[in-house]
Amino acid sequence: MNKQTPLIQIKNLDLHFGAFHALKNVSVDFHAGELVGLVGDNGAGKTTLIRVLCGIHTPSAGEVYFDGTRVKTFHPKLAIDQGIETIQQSVGLCDNLSIARNFYLGREPVKRFCGLPLLDFAKMREMSGRVIRQFGLRENVSVDDEVERLSGGERQSVKIGRAVEFKNRVVIMDEPTNHLSVREREHVNELALQLRDQGLLVIYITHDIFQVHRLADRIVIMENGEKIEDASTETMSAEALEEVIRQGGRIVEKRDAV
Amino acid sequence: MFFPTSLSRGAGFGAVVGVALMLSVFTVIDFDGWWTVQTVTNVLHFASILGLIAMGQALVIMSKEIDLSVGSVYGLAGIAFITLQPGLGVPGAIVAALLISALIGFLQAMAVLKGALPSMIVTLGGLFTVRGIIYVWTGGSVRAFPEEARSHWITRMLGGEFLGLEASLFWLLVLLAILSVLLWRTKFGNHLLAAGGDLDSAKSQGVQTDRTKTIAFVICSLLAGFAGIVTLADRPQTHVTLGELLELEAIAAAVIGGCLLSGGRGSLLGAVLGALIVVSFRYELIALGAPSSWFMTFVGIVLIIAVIFNQKLARAAGHSL
């Protein structure tokens, strides 16, 4: 991967919600084929930053470049069209719909029948069926089953499978292993590495620096809406990064001052 | 095929059992009174009218909203149809009445979605506003539909018999087929069920949920308006109270038919069968000589039983393709 041209480049990003200054002069680059851990305490601004990338929030100031082109309009649909998929614990699948219907939600394939564009169930079943087997769902789960019947890990697998199938370029995982069993957590983490190995940019948001340190190529730490650290996992240990979080960036300031 | 799948979907299944049970009971307790051409024809006609409105209501409920204005829209469209007919002719009056209905649906949807207001409140406002318009517009009395308009071929196609069926039943079946395909076999339908089931997840996948819900509100108002036109094409005299309390019967029909007010689940066939249950109860109670006011009590009891039954059924079924 060419590290010179970031897939996503954020420059001097500011975001205000009324009087609240949610993101303060954040600049960070993300490259294709990289797994970046985005770490910080509650209210640090991780999710807010991600929501800008997903088109939910429009920044108050600063610039965002996607694949070298400046992003001017922020809208969830545009982000999805660009190939940015967000995987969140509680959002992304509708419990009342079948796996196949969920898999294609928002990009349903259609087949013309007497000129009418009707859902192509054969394709929806076949593709989603192949993917759920590949991503390790139980054998007795059918693509016609409602998502309500799936375990937490299986839900994450469906979302990750969907991200791969639709050839996304960026997969943002927001606390993807909360409430999962140990085995399910490992499975989801393996999938995250697979995505990275396929050349996707994976942004992995978590509180748990030790968990993500094992996976990530780079860790970005945020606090109070600011980026306080951006380091390779090869050069900084998980313990050192945890100390940065604990000290709230004062270590970095001291180090930079030297 | 959409009928078998929507039946086995669970949501519509409860209503099928309900209709079978009800018909068995009526057959046992009042065979001679119930199974007459007159009763069956009347029940089917009024069930079809209510069924049209209930289908629209079902779509809105499945999108996790509600429309309390359908009774007033039904009244306004019917009255607009006969009031505008002298100036616009029969086809013109129908188009105008449908446009008025669609506009009301659209305006309410805008208030709900752009104003982020609860649909219960907005459409309650719609219920009163539209009823008020009927009173102001007609001055309290509605003209009768003249003979030449009644004999117009379009009027007869909507109000008389059509291909050997009550016209209202014919239109109900046609629209049930079209809307079932729309709901279960198109992108729009998938988006509607998703928006009703889990709004945030639907949005996260790029579904334009506001647009989807707006279309549901407009279809609901259009169906209510169309039902009003069909009613007056068949029985050409009416007054300003046309459609009062009909919204509650339509909601009851949709809920008896398996629509969960929590959104995302329901059945159009179920809503139609729910309408059949509501109307049949009214007829049979009158036929048995019970005071007509008992009707409301019975509908209430059926509604509560149906909700309990459908909640359990929806979870047990667990299939949605």
Image: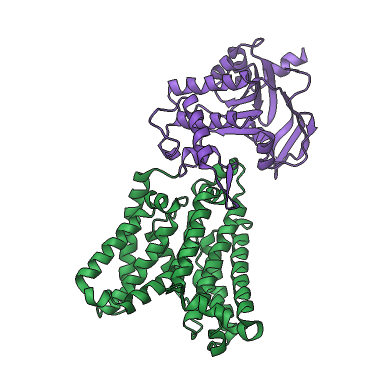
The front one of A9 and B288 is: B288
Q: Percent x, y for residue B69?
A: 52, 69
Q: Percent x, y for residue B180?
A: 48, 56
Q: Is residue B79 above or below residue B276?
A: below
Query: Image point 62% across, 48% down: which residue?
Result: B208
Say whether residue B20 is visible.
yes
Q: Percent x, y for residue B206?
A: 62, 43
The front one of B304 and A46 is: B304
- Quadrant housing the C terminus of chain B: top left
The front one of A1 and B51 is: B51
Query: Image point 54% across, 89% down: which residue?
Result: B147
Q: Is residue B6 above or below residue A200?
A: below
Q: Residue A168: which quarter of the image?
A: top right
Q: Is residue A189 above or below residue B80?
A: above
* Image-based side of A90 in relation to A78, left or right: left
Write down which chain is painted green. B
Write down which chain is painted purple. A
Query: Image point 53% across, 37% down: which residue?
Result: A123
